[in-house]
Amino acid sequence: MTSRFFFHMMAALAEMERDLIRERTMAGLSAARARGRNGGRRQSLTKLQVAQARLLLKHPDQTMAGVASSLGVSRSTLYRSLARHPEGVLLGEISGEALTVRAPARAWHEVRRNLRDAIGRSRA
């Protein structure tokens, strides 16, 4: 009988300790969020890179594999990033207005110039 009582007491203490650890962990995570820190893995493509990929993909000669390799990611990562950031929302967030592309992007320097101009307009 005493061994059963001892076992129950140890189990209750272990459960209490587990609850304390969970409580402290949750408090630490919420304090980190309040400081602006979010957990998890960083995204491999920034919003700017996704916008560049969208502009490159508008050109008929560009392939998903080519754009993905130029960004240093796999095709599946590029597909996920494009799905995660809808086109209208993304371009509006970067420039404050919709980007207008007069001609298809033919080179990286043209894409960067367009985005740099758009970002410059949004900061002014």
Image (cartoon, rainbow, N blue to C red):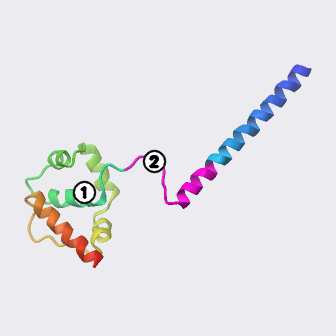
Query: Is residue 70 on the magenta stretch?
Result: no
**Where in the figure is residue 123, as x and y percent of width and height?**
29, 75
Residue at 9% x, 64% y is 104
Q: Which residue is labeled 1 in the image?
A: 49
Q: Can you say whether 60 is above or below 3 in the image?
A: below
| Residues drawn in magenta | 26-42
| Amino acid type at mark 1 | Gln
Q: 59 or 12, which is in the foreground? A: 12
Q: From this viewpoint, is residue 14 visible?
A: yes
Q: Can you say whether 56 is above or below 42 in the image?
A: below
**Is residue 57 found left or right of 97 in the rendered image?**
left
| Amino acid type at mark 2 | Gly
Determine the secondary structure under disc 2. loop
Whether label 2 touches label 1, CB < 8 Å: no
Give the residue at the far right of this rendering.
Answer: 1
Calculate the distance from the C-alpha at mark 2 to the C-alpha at mark 1: 20 Å
Categorize mark 2 by other alpha carbons within 10 Å: few (<14), some (14-19), many (20+).
few
Determine the secondary structure under disc 1. helix
Q: Which residue is labeled 2 in the image?
A: 40
Residue at 32% x, 59% y is 85
Categorize mark 1 by other alpha carbons within 10 Å: few (<14), some (14-19), many (20+).
some
Residue at 71% x, 43% y is 20
